[in-house]
Amino acid sequence: MKTEQLREMNKEELERKLAGLQDELFKAGIKVQTKQMENTAQLRMKRKDIARIKTLLREMAIKGIATTAAAESRK
């Protein structure tokens, strides 16, 4: 998934996508262990997508905190 697509999503959508990807990663890991999955590159792609989403959520959290702190300092 492209970062541009993820940036268009709001926080709730990103959290839902993150939960879904983590579930898929868990299931894919089990399939690899039981030799039911041939394309193990999917694990790497899912981990990278999870990292992208977590990074965007962290950026949102930092921006929210910075905005709140700036608003309080003006008072």
Image: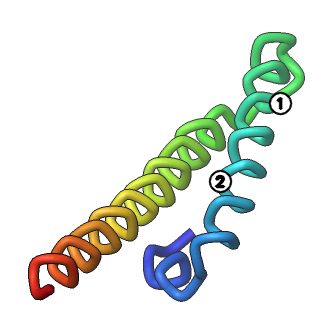
User: Percent x, y for residue 26?
Assistant: 75, 29
> Depth check: 15 or 3 in front?
15
Residue that mark 1 sits on = 27
Q: Is 31 located above or below residue 45 in the figure?
A: above
Q: Is residue 41 above or below residue 4?
A: above
- Residue 15 disc label: none
Quadrant location of the C terminus? Answer: bottom left
The residue shown at (10%, 78%) is 73
**Front in this rendered view, residue 9 or 64:** 64
Residue found at the very far top of the displayed protein: 34
Q: Residue 52: which quarter of the image?
A: bottom left
- Residue at left offset 79%, top offset 39%: 23
Vertical side of 4 occupied by 2: above or below: above
CA–CA distance in space, label 1 to label 2 = 14 Å
In the rendered structure, which disc, 1 or 2, sits on the residue that comes first in sequence? 2
- Is the image coloured rainbow, by chain, by secondary structure, or in one colour? rainbow
Q: Is residue 54 left or right of residue 9?
A: left
Q: Amino acid at mark 1?
A: Lys
Amino acid type indicated by mark 2: Leu
Can you give x and y, in whole percent of width and height, for residue 53 in the image? 50, 59
